[in-house]
């Protein structure tokens, strides 16, 4: 079997089954595990899958930069933003992550809402600025341009001095076994810090993030309070999370 044929077979199996086990594929094709592992390395290098011990899982397309992510699931992110905005109560202190879904939350808040929002994203802070009843606290630090958020020690120290009621956490991958993931280790660390300082952590995940994995873990599913997903999704996308005991809300 040619290399291209093997890789096509692997990607089709990954799409069908949601995971690849290198040993099983090698037995199925009558090839060595080394050959399959080499194919997996090359496919991972192209961003087509995420290697894990013994095989591979779907890679999240949401690891692209902020500009590219704006074209991913725009309707779904609008629905998620609208649903999340309704969860905010007057007088609360809210941590709002960076990203395109967070901007949708800002756009759908009640115009008369009085609350305090804390964010490490300049773009999200600007989106919140039009709400005259909202106090906006901007966390500083080193700018991570890929996601347009502040990271590093300065950001972590500022976060440690705040206690929030809710944290709307943005991720690039949500997997029932691998948990919540993102594409950068420093960004993952800041997300963990925000979650630790919050009474509740709510994850907003558009369709392409469900069942996908990125290189750096943020938390396990058990560490969050609610997973908000789009309505009308196929059961095979949401069943693994329900079976894991995750509370799911549909936008």
Image (cartoon, rainbow, N blue to C red):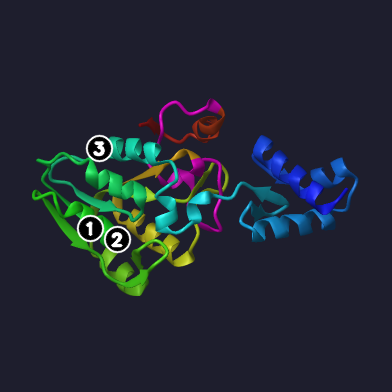
Q: Was residue 1 drawn as part of the magenta stretch in this picture? A: no
Residue 161 place in picture, x, y as percent? 24, 65
Q: Is residue 241 above or below residue 185?
A: above
Residue 170 place in picture, x, y as percent? 39, 50
Residue that mark 2 sits on: 121
- What is the spatial separation of the Cα atoms under label 3 and label 1, in whole angstroms? 19 Å
Mark 3 touches mark 2? (CB < 8 Å): no
Q: Locate residue 151: give its quadrant.
A: bottom left
Q: Is residue 202 left or right of residue 186?
A: left
Q: Is residue 155 above or below residue 61?
A: below
Instruction: Write the start and end of the magenta stretch as one range.
Output: 208-235
- What is the spatial separation of the Cα atoms under label 1 and label 2, in whole angstroms? 6 Å
Q: Was residue 234 drawn as part of the magenta stretch in this picture? A: yes
Q: Secondary structure at mark 2?
A: loop
Mark 1 touches mark 2? (CB < 8 Å): yes
Visible residue check, residue 218 = no
Q: Is residue 195 left or right of residue 15?
A: left
Residue that mark 3 sits on: 87
Residue found 27% across the figure and 44% down from its top: 105
Q: Which of labels 3 and 1 is toward the front?
A: 1
Q: Secondary structure at mark 3?
A: loop
* Closer-to-camera residue (21/11): 11
Q: Secondary structure at mark 1?
A: helix
Q: From the image, which quarter does the C terminus lie in? A: top left
Q: Which of labels 3 and 2 is toward the front?
A: 2
Mark 3 touches mark 1? (CB < 8 Å): no
Sequence-wise, the earlier of marks 3 and 2 is 3
Residue that mark 1 sits on: 125
Visible residue check, residue 188 = yes
Residue found 48% across the figure and 34% down from its top: 245
- What is the spatial separation of the Cα atoms under label 3 and label 2, in whole angstroms? 20 Å
């Amino acid at each position: 079997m040619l290399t291209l044929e093997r890789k096509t077979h692997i990607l089709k199996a990954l799409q069908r089954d949601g995971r690849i086990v290198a040993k099983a594929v090698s037995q199925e094709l009558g090839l060595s595990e080394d050959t399959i592992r080499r194919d997996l390395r090359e496919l991972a290098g192209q961003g087509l899958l995420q290697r894990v011990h013994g095989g591979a899982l779907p890679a999240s397309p949401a690891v692209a930069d902020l500009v590219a992510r704006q074209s991913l699931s725009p309707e779904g992110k609008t629905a998620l933003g609208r649903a999340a905005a309704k969860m905010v109560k007057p007088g609360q202190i809210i941590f709002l992550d960076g990203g395109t879904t967070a901007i949708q939350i800002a756009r759908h808040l009640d115009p008369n809402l009085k609350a305090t929002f804390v964010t490490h994203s300049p773009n999200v802070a600007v989106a919140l600025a039009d709400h005259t009843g909202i106090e906006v606290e901007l966390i500083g630090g080193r700018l991570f341009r890929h996601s347009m958020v502040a990271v590093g020690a300065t950001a972590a120290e500022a976060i440690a001095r705040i206690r929030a009621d809710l944290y709307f956490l943005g991720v690039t991958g949500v997997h029932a076994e691998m948990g919540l993931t993102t594409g950068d280790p420093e960004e993952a660390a800041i997300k963990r810090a925000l979650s630790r300082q919050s009474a509740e952590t709510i994850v907003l995940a558009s369709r392409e993030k469900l069942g996908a994995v990125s290189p750096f873990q943020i938390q396990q599913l058990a560490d969050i309070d609610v997973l908000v997903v789009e309505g009308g999704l196929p059961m095979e996308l949401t069943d693994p999370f329900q079976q894991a005991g995750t509370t799911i809300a549909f936008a």
